Image (cartoon, grey):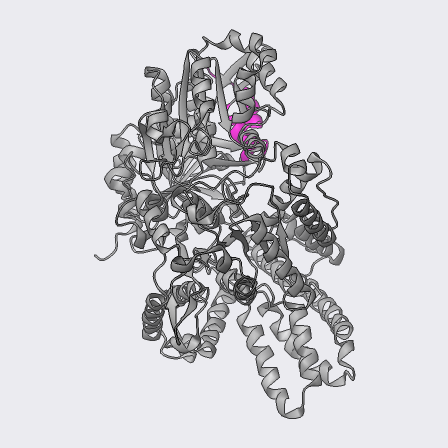
Amino acid sequence: MSTQPELVLENQLIEQLSNIGYTKVNIPDETALLTNLKAQLEKHNNITFTEKEFERVLNILSKGSVFEKAKTLREKQHIVRDNGDNLYFEFLNTEHWCQNQYQVTRQVTIDGSYKNRYDVTLLINGLPLVQIELKRRGLEMKEAFNQINRYQRHSFGAKSALFQYVQIFIISNGVNTKYYANNRHQSFKQTFYWTNKENKRLTNILNGFTSEFLEPCHISKMICKYIVLNETHKVLMVLRPYQFYAVEALIDRVKNSTKNGYIWHTTGSGKTLTSFKASQIIMKMPQVKKVVFVVDRKDLDFQTTKEFNSFSKGSIDGTDNTRALVKQFSDDTRIIVTTIQKLNTAISRKSYLAKMEQLKDERIVFIFDECHRSQFGETHNRIKSFFNNHQMFGFTGTPIFADNAVKNELGKRTTKELFGECLHKYVITDAIKDENVLKFSVEYVGRYKQKESATEIDIEVQDIDRKELMESPKRLEKIADYIIANHSRKTHSKEFTAMFCVGSTDMLIDYYDIFQRKKNEGKHNLKIATIFSYVANEDDADANGYIPEEVSIVEEAAVLYGMNGHKRDKLESYIGHYNQMFGSNFSTRDSQSFYNYYNDISKKVKEREIDVLLVVNMFLTGFDSPTLNTLYVDKNLKYHGLIQAYSRTNRIINEQKSQGNIVVFRNLKKATDDAITLFSNKQAIEVIIMQPYEDYVEKFDQAYSKLLGITPTVDNVNELVSEEDELEFIKAFRELMRLKNTITTFANFDWEDLAMDEQLFNDFRSKYLDLWQKTKHDTTKEKVSILDDVDFELELIHRDEINVTYILKLLASLKDAKQSEQEAKKKEIVDILSGEANLRSKRELIEKFIQDSLPLIEDSDNIPQEFEKFWTKEQKRAFDKFVKEENLSSDKTQKLIEDYLYAERTPLRDELLDLIDGEKPSVLKRKSIGDRILQRVVHFVDTFINGMDT
């Protein structure tokens, strides 16, 4: 048998779970689930509920969202008994997590919008806290992920909604297994493999995963200790394995020794969450007085405090000044977030010493964020000598070794010398393998010619890397032109953003002025912004690995008043451009306004409102934005400074962002290779750096050949007989799209290099979208299709500039075109309507407008308003037809559509059936009629409302 049936896999899994401590129980439906819950809660709490008392318990359980229910699960509970007594009980023992009741059941059936039957459910104290969905071997796990999302929509919230208490989902096809928290907002990218401490994956659900991850004590520990409730976004987050092992190592160190240590987790791997969870657990240990989380700049202080408080509201009081910090050391604050500068002042200034000295002998745990940046001077020694009972832990993505250590007043010092042994390692190769960060695509642009006698000889940049050449106006102009020409390609039509880091503030000013001049000349429409503070311009040739701290924005006086007057005037004018662009009112006149400017730039880069952010050093460390995918580099970087800067681009967000793009205008090839080798291993370069353009051309051609094996021509797609055949075509073309998405970011991309031409690709894409539309908008389906859970990855198709407004411009050009050109232009419009996912539902109507209305319009300037009249008329006609055919109340239907649009909530079946005028359908027909009405509502909104930005 080539594939293992789901039933066989399910049987084997149930047996294994039974062997490791789960009691098998038969729970076919909601009634049995509630009966079992009552019995398990009584057993766990050693009490007996009357029927009315249990109704009060169910009333507690029924309230709130998934997030609020996760809180309810962890809180102590209270009801008033029938006899008037107070009864206190719990749903889950979070302190002694092994002391809970464990059961396993299968095929629980819940009837919501659809009747859904869930594969394997783990019950803890009778509540379904872990849900396992299985697929047969050979199927993509993403199908199981999409299936769970469908359950979220259709049935988890039905009846008593106990399945909203699921904390962890497991998806597996037998050989591959992943887990993730119950958070509907995350994508498949936020699902994780479990590993051992050495980062070796345990992927087979029957061979390693179940015995390690689903072992009762371990899964309870994950639920009770290692799920974080994010207060800002109201979602659950679960720690990844390397985060789990790091926290466990820190806890063990504090419990069993007074030794220091450090955690090496690569940039972008979620160190803030790891350090928060470690701090949260350590602060509860009776032997620890305080946990002090130390960062090295005000922006990181603000950011880290914000992130910590998002994980646990009000858990951190940010220390705005040193006086507030000293007060926190004196009061009962258990976790403190502060900067290294303020901590140094607190233990150095005489006015604070009386209060601080009272803590000299207390057990204080210090956790240093990005410890390579600020812990190599006198301050570190001062902290160590002041506190007699300290314990110090460092987090870093790029440790200091002998190879990249920089000599300072205390000589060359490594991370190991300062913090002791490394307690856990998760390097960049691990993160890329686990798809927790992306690879880098590094392109080196620019060779320079030097005349020698009568001939011209190519000389690499490093051979003539002199200030005169590097800062020459002609060179800067060419680089600016390159960025303008290629930015759209690199960022997928500005779907993402970019940073441009340069060697000095002088160069930054020159570059900014060039971009601004070219913008005024109409040569680009990029939104360029910048921020910098004064620092003596470092000599690029001596790049030592550090990204120097420009004068910290906490030290505003130095930034604003120590700055060279010319540069401050320049920055003030650049902020003026920014204010014009965004209607803001920032300046360098006072420190708070400048700090607000800094935070606003950070926000706008993340929200893709800035196209290119020009910097010298700011934002190259500690700045985390998944929407940033490109870094232009005209600056010498080395070792940890290089990895830190490159890593701004490799945060995961969706399928469209397939790599971090690094475009280097200097010869940093050796520096890049050296840095990658240092921070991973000798073989790491091919894992971390994207392959050459030619390799992706070859892969694309191979994928194209595979596609032709399934559908030799475009018309053959129409002849696919079964859904299984359609699925094979979808998978093959999706792989082709992924490769095209990667290959088009290369500056030298050309369709001529590929075996498939662009027109044929677009024709196949149109057929692919036909299948998507058939699957998502078929109102006649009576059963769930195997294509329902396939991810079509439409973000690989989406092009932001193609919308209704764009089509109207093409219609105007069609109207004004010569007779001989009109057919070609009409075909162009039809091809676009066929190939754009966001326009396909509108294609038939737009074609009708072209056929019937366009010839009657005399002036192309009138097309937008005529189109709007046409669209309003067609919308009313479609709405009237819809409500008449389904016998619906017009007013109620209109209100339901408005609620659907503005509340972004899919209507419930009862709400849809309530639209029907007259006699309601029988019980047997309720499901099919409700589903059909819902599909028609969705199709109406997609056609007439979504994307109509004209």
Q: In the image shown, does 799 or 692 lie closer to the viewer?
A: 692
Any part of residue 694 in sight: yes
Residue plotted at (73% across, 50% down): 576
Left or right, 189 with respect to 842, comes to left
Q: Which residue is at a point 43% across and 60% down the rendered structure image?
A: 787
Q: In this view, does 88 lie above or below 630?
A: above
Seen in the picture, residue 223 relative to 925 is either above or below; the reply is above
Residue 717 part of the magenta segment: no
Provide the residue span drawn in magenta: 46-74
Q: Position of residue 281 (x, y in %)?
A: 44, 22
| Residue 415 relative to residue 893: left or right | left
Q: Which quadrant of the view contains residue 397?
A: top left
Which is more toward the observer, 550 or 370? 550
Q: For the C terminus, which image quadrant?
A: bottom right
The reply to whether the magenta stretch includes residue 47 is yes
Q: In which quarter of the image is the N terminus?
A: bottom left
Q: How many labels does the image show?
A: 0
Main secondary-structure element of the magenta-colored stretch? helix
Q: In this view, does 317 lie above or below 171?
A: above
Give x and y (percent) for residue 247.
Answer: 38, 27
User: Does residue 914 show up?
Assistant: no
- The image quadrant of residue 454 is bottom left
Q: Quadrant of residue 332?
A: top right
Residue 801 screen position, x and y as percent: 61, 66
Residue that extends furthest to the left in the rendered view of this protein: 1
* Residue in the image at 76% along x and 84% along y: 856
Q: Viewer-proximal residue, 703 or 163?
A: 703
Of 754 and 842, nearer the camera is: 754
Q: Residue at x 51, y 26 (%)?
A: 340
Seen as rendered, the residue at the extreme front is 453
**Which percent across, then down, holds residue 838?**
58, 65
